[in-house]
Image (cartoon, grey):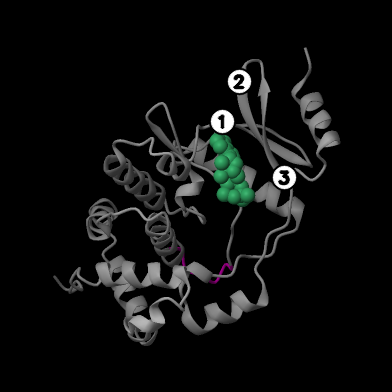
Amino acid sequence: MKSMKTIIDERLQKEPKLEIFSIEYEGRKFWVKRARKTGSNLLQHFVYMLTKIPLVTPVEHKNAQEALKFESSKIQELYDLSIPVPKVIEVSKEYFIIEDCGPTVQNLLRKNLLDNSTAIFENIIIQLAALHNLGKFHGGSLIKNITYKDEKLYFIDFEESFDKKIDIQELQFRDLFLFLFSLGKAKIEVNYTTLVNQYIDLTHNKDMIDKFHKLASKVSTLMKLVENKSLWNIVGTDTQIVYKLLQDIQKVPSLDKNQ
Ligand SMILES: Nc1ncnc2c1ncn2[C@@H]1O[C@H](COP(=O)(O)OP(=O)(O)O)[C@@H](O)[C@H]1O
Ligand SMILES: [Mg+2]
């Protein structure tokens, strides 16, 4: 019987460029994530400085070792807090091993394998709210980083960290925004307002609506441009998704904080 280490070493000898891959060990599936650096390019810093659009918040630079330590310990910490994340099996200098948590929500949607998608999106909001209520953030809460197995959701992919100066509330707003954005990108017809309201019910974080409104007004010039249909096709798809998302959420009235 080969050890996990041998299975991994043999696989990497054959495919040295692999960064994330699954292995079978004792009839069970695991994922191996190798150390690799993180960071954003100058353009992303520049666009964020101008727009403050959460989608382009620059990611902190970490070397491969720092990134591996950051992600594996964050997953471990969240696991201990009963947040649905994979169990960490082993951490070495080169990689860490986690349990398989099923296919991603993005893949299941693509293959039309989710017949209760509305309930699943609501469940994602519940899990995201639970994470945020603990004062934490995900950092990459797109549907490609959320998996579904045995009727249970899991968050994966926690390698992104941000400048310490960025407020946690901003990072939580970014999480909610990224999740909704990823639904739009997957061309899912969804009522964003219901999901945002549900999130607010669970977190009592009414500032989120204001943040959506502020973001909408920041990109209002862009939105006006996009309203011109001839420009609609020229502007990138991502911008169009952000536009639609903000248009929808703008229908939620601003909350008077004194009430
Ligand atoms: N624990 C896991 N369970 C199921 N699938 C996983 C797991 N970890 C990684 N994956 C798969 O590998 C892909 C890449 O892993 P991820 O941690 O998201 O890395 P990246 O930073 O490259 O996006 C995921 O989108 C998913 O398909
Ligand atoms: Mg990912």
- State the SS at label 1: loop
The kind of residue on which mark 2 rests is Arg
- Label disc, if present, on residue 100 of the rendered structure: 1
Q: Which quarter of the figure is the N terminus placed in?
A: top right
Q: Does 94 sit above or below residue 184?
A: above
Kindly check if marks 3 and 2 are in contact, taking CB atoms under 8 A apart as contact.
no
The verdict on residue 117 being magenta is: no
Pick the front one: 128 or 21: 21
Disc 3 residue lies near ligand 1 with CB under 8 A: yes
Q: In screen coordinates, is 4 left or right of 105?
A: right
**What secondary structure is the stretch in magenta mostly built from?**
loop
Q: Residues within 10 Å of mark 3 (few under 14, many from 20)?
A: few
Side (left or right) of 233 relative to 121? right
Residue 246 in the figure: left or right of residue 96: left
What span is in magenta? Answer: 163-168
Q: Earlier in the sequence, mark 1 or mark 2?
A: 2
Tell me the quarter of the image containing the C terminus: bottom left
